[in-house]
Amino acid sequence: MTDGISADLLQDILDEVREDSSGELVPHLADYVHPNPDALALAVCDLDGHVVSAGDDQIRFDLQSASKPFVYALALDQKGVDEVAKRIGVEPSGDPFNEISLEAGTGRAPNALVNAGALAAHALVGDQSDDEDSRFEQIRALFARLVGREVEVDQEVIDIEARNAHRNQALAHLLAEEGNLADDPHRVVAGYGRQCAIRVDTRELARMAATLAAGGRLPGGDDRLLGRKAVRYATSVMFTCGMYDAAGDWVYQVGLPAKSGVSGCLFAVVPGRFGVAAYSPRLDDHGNSVRAAAAIEALSDRLDLHVLDTASHHGFGPAT
Amino acid sequence: MTDGISADLLQDILDEVREDSSGELVPHLADYVHPNPDALALAVCDLDGHVVSAGDDQIRFDLQSASKPFVYALALDQKGVDEVAKRIGVEPSGDPFNEISLEAGTGRAPNALVNAGALAAHALVGDQSDDEDSRFEQIRALFARLVGREVEVDQEVIDIEARNAHRNQALAHLLAEEGNLADDPHRVVAGYGRQCAIRVDTRELARMAATLAAGGRLPGGDDRLLGRKAVRYATSVMFTCGMYDAAGDWVYQVGLPAKSGVSGCLFAVVPGRFGVAAYSPRLDDHGNSVRAAAAIEALSDRLDLHVLDTASHHGFGPAT
Amino acid sequence: MTDGISADLLQDILDEVREDSSGELVPHLADYVHPNPDALALAVCDLDGHVVSAGDDQIRFDLQSASKPFVYALALDQKGVDEVAKRIGVEPSGDPFNEISLEAGTGRAPNALVNAGALAAHALVGDQSDDEDSRFEQIRALFARLVGREVEVDQEVIDIEARNAHRNQALAHLLAEEGNLADDPHRVVAGYGRQCAIRVDTRELARMAATLAAGGRLPGGDDRLLGRKAVRYATSVMFTCGMYDAAGDWVYQVGLPAKSGVSGCLFAVVPGRFGVAAYSPRLDDHGNSVRAAAAIEALSDRLDLHVLDTASHHGFGPAT
Amino acid sequence: MTDGISADLLQDILDEVREDSSGELVPHLADYVHPNPDALALAVCDLDGHVVSAGDDQIRFDLQSASKPFVYALALDQKGVDEVAKRIGVEPSGDPFNEISLEAGTGRAPNALVNAGALAAHALVGDQSDDEDSRFEQIRALFARLVGREVEVDQEVIDIEARNAHRNQALAHLLAEEGNLADDPHRVVAGYGRQCAIRVDTRELARMAATLAAGGRLPGGDDRLLGRKAVRYATSVMFTCGMYDAAGDWVYQVGLPAKSGVSGCLFAVVPGRFGVAAYSPRLDDHGNSVRAAAAIEALSDRLDLHVLDTASHHGFGPAT
C-alpha cells in the first residue's frame, strides 16, 4: 500500500484497460527488438520509495523520449535556467514530436520535449572538455542513480536508430546553424541515440517519476539528485507538452505532468505525492502507448489526481 | 487575513511592482474610456468569501477576455463536454489571441480562450429559442451571481468595439462556414461585445476567481454556480492558454491558471484555496497587464503557489 | 481559320478530351443552376476579332473567378499600379483560392486571383461617391464592351452565393481591419457576388481573352479598353496564380496565362496572337474544369504555345 | 551589335544603375573571397554566339545558385520528367531560398531553385555507380561545354561553404528521410558545394543563358547540349521561382526567366532571342544583386522583353 494505493487497485485498472488491443508497435523498432505487444504493467512509487505494481512489471524497455525531462532537468541544474533558455524555449506546442521548426526569431527549439529541444538539452550536459563519451557517462550516471543500479544501453536499438536518424540529423544541423547546439551535430545525435536506448522496467520508471514528484530528492532519503527549480521546469513542460499533440486532451482529462516513449512506456508525476509509470508497447497515432495512457488516466480519475481539480487539494468531497 | 494572506502582504507586493510604468493602454479603448494608467490593485478571495485587497480596489473595468473562461464553463454546463468539443478544441496554442486560424480538419476554434473559441462559446449559451438579448441575459445573470450584484455593461465600450469588430466578424463568419457557430455571426459578435463590456472591480474579480478555485461553488456558501467538471475544463485551458502567447513562460514561472483582459485586469486560480485578481491598465506586447502579471507572479513566488511545485503540497521546505 | 487554327482542329481536340468524365460539379451551384455536366466547348478569337469554335459554344455560364483578371485590370487602370499595390500583392501563391491568409506585414491580399485579392480589386473600382450599384455598373459596362452586348447577371446564382458567402465575408472583414478594403465588407461581398454571376458563352470568353492578348485593345479595332500595363499585370498574375494550386504544373506544361471559374469555364491568353476559351462543368480537386484544362493544354501542345518555349518564337523546329 | 543590342546600350544602362551602392556582400563569403564590391558588368549573347558586353566583364565569380537551373535541366535530361518529378516539385514558392520545408504529403522539394530542390537535382545526376567525384565531373563537364573552356572551382569557397553548410545538411537529411535524395546527404552536400564554386565571368554567363534561350542548343552551332523539354522546365521554374521571394515583382516588372547567385551574378533568358547576364556583388534583402537586377530590368524595359507583353510579339507599337 503506497499513499493509499494498493496492488489490487493497480491490477483492477490493468484488467480494465487490457482488452484494448488497438495501436501499433513503432515500425522501425518492432522488427528488431521484438517486444511482446501484449505486455502490460503499472507501478506507483511514493516519496518514501515504496513501490506497488501490477502486471509485467519487470520487463525492461528503452526509455526513448521518456528520458527527455530528466536530461533537461540535468542541463538546467548544470547550466542554469537563463543559459538553457537561450537554446530551448518554453512554449506549449501542438506540433508533432519531430516537427522541423525552430522558434521564429530566436532559432531555439520550441521546448525540451520535442526532438529539437531534446537534442539541445543533451548537448548542454557537461562542458567543453567533454566529448560524446564523457557527456553520455554523466547522463548514464544520472539514470543509474534514479533507478538505483547500473543501467545498460541496448546496442541493437542504437544501431537501428542510427540508421533512421535523418530527421534528428536535420534538426541538429538546424540548431547548429542557429548557434543553438553546444556541440557537433553528429556527436549530439549519436549521444542522444544512446540516451534513448537506456533500459529500465516499469517499477524503476515509477521510482524515477517519484524523484520528480519529490522536487528532485531521491525517494526514501534526503539525497537531492536534481534541483527543485529544474524539476519545476521539467514538470511544467511535461504538463503542457509531454503527450505530443495529444497534449490538450491529456491536460483536461488527466491533468498530470507526463511523458511517453515510443517503446510504449509512460510516466506521470503527482507533485508532492508519488510517481506513476505504465508500459504497453502498442502506440496510438500520436505515438503514445494506448493502454499505458488509459491506465494512468483511470488512476487519475479514480483518485482525483488532476492538479487543477479541487478534490486533489484540501480534501474536498466529490462533486458533479 | 485570508488563507494566511494579509492586506499588508498585498500592499507590499503592489509597492514592489508599482514603479514599472512600461506598457501601453490598448489603443482603441484608451481614447474613449480614459482609464487612469497608474491605477493598480490586488485582491484575494478565499473559499469562505473573505476578501483582502490593496490599492485601487474599487475602480471598475471591463472584463474583456477575462469573461471567457466563465462563459466557456457556462456553455459546458448547459451543453455538456461532448457537444462543446464539437465546436471548440482543447489544444494549447502559442498563437496570438486573435489569430485567424481554425483547427485543421475539424474547423473548430483551437481553444476557448482565443477569440474564435470565445465567440463559439458565447453562441453555445442558451438554446435555439434564444435571441441575442435573451442569450446575453443568461450571461449577465451568471456574472451577477458571481459578483453578488447586478452588473452593468459599458455602452461606450460596446460601441467602440463594434466599430473595431472586423476581426471578430471574420472569425465568426469562418466558424459559421465550418458549421461551428450556433447562431448568426452578426448576432454573436454583437452579443460577445456586450459580454466583454461587463464591469467589475478587482475585489469582485477575485471573488469570481474564488468560485473557480472552489470547483464552481460560490465562496462562503454551498451554492453551486458551475459544475466541477466544467470548472476543471475552464481552469485547464486557462493554465495552458490563458496568457496568450506568453503562456509558456507563465506556466513555468507562475504555474497557476490565469486569464487577462485588455482593460488591464488579470485573475488567477489557486485550486482548492483561493482566487486572486489584479488590475493595472498598461499592457505588454502580449496584451497582458504588465503590473498585474508581476503582482500575481510575486504572490505565487512568495507563497509557493505553482501547482506543480512540491512546496505547494505536503509542506515541503524550500530547496534550491 | 484564325491564326492558322481551324474549327476542325478545335473539334478534333474536343473529341480527344470528351471521354474524360471525371470531376464533379461545384456542389452549391449544381443543385440550383443545373448545368449540363456533359457540355463541352472550345473557341479561339484572334486579334482581328475572328472567332472559330467547336462544341456547345453558345451555352452561357457564370464567369465566376474568370472575371477576376478583368476587374483587376480595371482597378489598375483607374487607380494606377502603386495605389492598387497598397492593397493587393503580386506574389505567386500555391494556396487554395479561398485561403484565409493575408500577406504578413502588409495585410494585403497575396494577389488578385485569390478571393481576398478579387474582393480588394472589386472594391477599388470607382470612387468614394460610388455605391454598390454604381460600382457594379462600371464593372458590368466593362464586360458588356468586352463581349459586345449587354450582359445579364444570374440572380439565382447571386442568391445562392449570398447564402454561401461566409468565407468571403471573413476575408472582406479581415481586409477591412487591415485598412485594405476600399468599402464596407458587406457591400463589397454583395457586389462581388454580382460580378461572379455575369453570364457569357465560350465564344464571348475567347473574345474577352483576345482583348488581353492584344494588350487591352478590342479585337478587330483600335479601341483600347484596358491599358497595356494593366493587362501585363493581369496576365502576369494569371501566369503564376491563375490555376489555383495547380499553378505550378500549368506553368510547366501549358505555359500560358489562364484563369478558370468554378462554373467550368477557362480562358488563356497567347500574347500578341489570340485568346482561347473552353467550357466543361466538371471540376478537378483544384476547382479547375477537367476537360477545359485538357483542351487548352492540347492546343498549347499542338501549336507550341508555351511562352517560354523557343518554338513559339522565331520558328524553331521541333526538338526532343 | 547583337539582336539590335549594342555595347553602348549596355554601357548606358550600367551608367544608369552604377550609382546605387545599396546592399551588402554575402557575409560568409565577403571575408574570404574579397570581391570588389563596386564591380559591375552586363553582357548579352545571341543565338549565333555573338556577345556584347560592358563593364567588368572579365571578373570571374562563383556561380552559386545560378548553377541550379542547368543542373536541374541535366537531371531532367538524364532521368526524364517523371522520375525527377518524384523528388522535385514544380510549385511556385514565395519562400526564402533556404526555407526548411518540403512539400506536404510528398516530401518533395517544392521546386528546383530552392536549396532542397537543388540538392535533390544534384543527387539525380549520374547513376548508382557514380560517387561524389564522378557525379561532379559530369556537372563540371556540362559547365565546361556551356562556357567553352575548362572550368575551375574555387577551393577556398568550397571550404568556407563546408563550414557553413548546416542548413544544407539539414535539408539533405530531410530529403533522405523522405526517400527523396538519391545519394548520401554528406556526399550530396559536398558535391553541391563544389557545383556552387564553379567560376565564370559575365560574358560566359550570358553565353550559358543563350543556350537556354536556344532551347538547349549551343549558341552559334547545331550542337544540342540540353533537351528542349528540360530547358522549358528549367526556364519555367526560373520564371516563377528564380528570384527567391522577390519572384512576384520580377514576374510583373521584368517578365523574364532569371536566376541569381549570392556572389552577385544574375542571368535571364529571352526565349528564342538571346541570353543576358549581369554581375555586381552587393545583394538586396532577398539575396539578389541590387545592380545586376536593376540592369536587367532596365534592359527589359527598354527593349520590351516581358514575355507576356504584346510588344514583345508581332511588333506592336508602344501603348500606355
Image: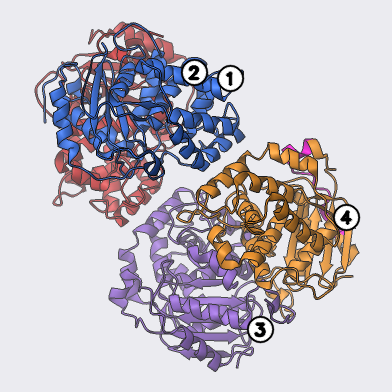
Chain colours: A blue, B red, C purple, D orange
Considering the image in quadrants, where does the N terminus of chain C appear? bottom right
Give the number of the disc on residue B182.
none
What's the CA distance linking mark 4 and mark 1?
52 Å
CB under 8 Å between discs 1 and 2: yes
Residue pointed to by mark 4: D57
Res. B25 in view: no
Protein chain holding label 3:
C
In this view, the residue farthest toward the left is B222
Per the rendering, the mark at residue C222 is 3
Q: Are marks 1 and 3 on the same chain?
A: no
The segment highlighted magenta reads: D11-31
Q: Label 1 sits on what residue type?
A: Asp
Report helix, strand or loop for mark 3.
loop
Q: Nearer the viewer, residue B300 or C11?
A: C11
Position of residue A25 measured from the top left corner of the image (x, y, whole percent): 33, 43
* Secondary structure type for disc 1: loop
The residue carrying mark 1 is: A130
Marks 1 and 2, how far apart at CA: 10 Å
Is A285 on the left-hand or right-hand side of D44?
left
User: Mark 4 packing: few (<14 Cα in 10 Å), some, or many (20+)?
Assistant: many
Q: Which kind of residue does numbered mark 4 sit on? A: Asp
Q: Is residue B84 magenta?
A: no
Residue A138 marker: 2
Residue at (40%, 25%) from the top-left corner? Answer: A69
Residue D297, position as x, y percentages in the image:
74, 60
Structural distance between the alpha carbons of marks 2 and 4: 59 Å
**Chain hosting mark 4:** D
Is circle 3 on the same chain as circle 4? no
